Amino acid sequence: MSLKFITPEQAAEFIHHDDNVGFSGFTPAGSPKVVAGAIAAKAEAEHAAGREFKIGVFTGASTGDTLDGVLARANAVKIRTPYQSNKDLRNCINDGSAPYFDAHLSQLAQETRYGFFGKINVAVIEAADVTDNGEIVLTTGVGNIPTFARLADHIIIELNTKHPKFIKGLHDIYECDDPPFRREIPIYKPSDRIGSPVLKVDPAKIVGIVENNMNDQVAGFTAPDEVTQTIGDRVAHFLVGEMKAGRVPASFLPIQSGVGNIANALLGALGKNPDIPAFEMYTEVIQDAVIGLMKEGNVKFASGCSLTITPEVLGSIYDDWAFFKDKLVLRPQEISNSPEVARRLGLITINTALEADIFGNINSTHVLGTKMMNGIGGSGDFTRNAYLSIFTCPSVAKGGKISAIVPMVSHLDHSEHSVKILVTEQGVADLRGKSPIQRAQCIIENCVHPDYKQLMWDYLKLSKTTHTPHTLASAFKMHLEFAESGDMHNTRW
């Protein structure tokens, strides 16, 4: 059959009020760029005519403003999952106008197949190439699109000419069977390939191709400051110590790292440390620092779900494709984030906390326990199944008015049972094999900012000796004090 080219507005006509739409990509990488804008314009026109128009927005993770932002501003979101990072969408989530359910990234594809969220009506896929027989070369992100595309009634292709056709082979597309027929995922080292280099769909479902020529909306990271650099150096030094102690093999283990400025600084610190050998990565987001480490010979291979890198760095990859093509692979997120594979490979996982408490519990998602920041992402997939799970954060925020270490986290994403190591710029707390009181003593001594250290020691003394010495009447006083006065320093027990 011959595929036809259509406009974004024509594509939007295939999407109706109350539809569930699955979009490709993972972060802004590989996310569609122009169809969502046409959907938003349609929503605004429908609203102006007095008619309802909202859709379910299912993605891999966050997207760019050209997807999450335009739909949020058009009041066109009936439900959003599994992760987001757009300011306007975040505001809509927190004022209740855009319902959102936060989900572990590895689980959304299978739970969509199970029918937990209703039908996926339309899939919108960014592609570098597409053939008449339905073979699609994806771009810089995969996400959940293999499942969305298979389940959808209609498929819309955004053919993005920023991405050359010669990247065919970058992807490894594999979809798990559902119980009771599921077998093991046969990945035994990060470079193993188990699927297809292309996404194969029924060509009869492709209703049209929309052209675009837009870069992924990936902003550059700020240069490491003293705090983020210190955190990175502390993690690298700790891992060197683990190697010398024989608890991490001399050949090292694959790394999973979250995304952001701390993660970028941390990866740079690992690469610069002469005692850490060249290593592999099995992660979800491959960012700029990884590409730099590859060029320097410090990263041998990276498996992920997306190339979340700046346009300049992406251009350098395409210009030197012969060097990179056998060092990178992009997978669907139920594979890149698979708990099964994470445990088998023995990953060292490094993720970022919004806040931690003195017993080792982590809040990754909620400001003061109520306002959604971004979402849990893949941190739970990796943390619970890591060989060694590490969480990092600066010890204070808002110019020191917030302590990132508190008596009790205001929202729990990762419990003390999963968190092995906590690192701030103040130091490293090794929580392995410690009782709750011992963990509290270790975290206060090593990770809490000096301005808050005595406050934490005083809190610990409030309780009579119990297994976990909380004083429930005071556990959230620091949060309440910040809400009232804007400064946790003013807390009084």
Image (cartoon, helix red, strand yellow):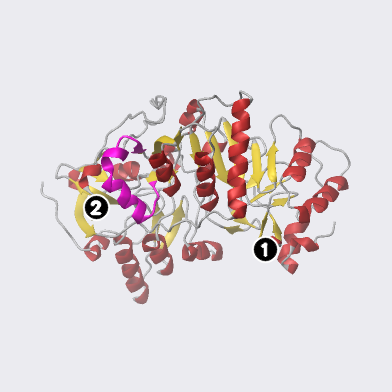
| Mark-to-mark CA distance, 2 and 1 | 46 Å
Q: Residue furthest bottom?
A: 48
Residue hosting label 1: 399
Part of the protein shown in magenta: 307-329
Mark whose residue sits in front, 2 or 1: 1
Residue hosting label 2: 157
Across and down, in percent, residue 316 comes to: 32, 49
The residue lying at 68 percent from left, 52 percent from top is 395
Q: Is residue 103 left or right of residue 10?
A: right
Q: In this view, does 491 lie to the left or right of 248?
A: right
Q: Which amino acid type is shown beneath numbered disc 1? A: Gly
Q: In this view, does 416 lie above or below 75?
A: above
Q: Which residue lies furthest to the front in this view?
A: 274
At numbered mark 1, what does the secondary structure look like: helix, strand or loop? helix
Q: In which quarter of the image is residue 247?
A: top right
Q: Specify whether residue 313 is painted magenta.
A: yes
At numbered mark 2, what does the secondary structure look like: helix, strand or loop? strand
Numbered tag placed on residue 48 in the rendering: none
Across and down, in percent, residue 54 comes to: 39, 63
The residue lying at 31 percent from left, 68 percent from top is 42
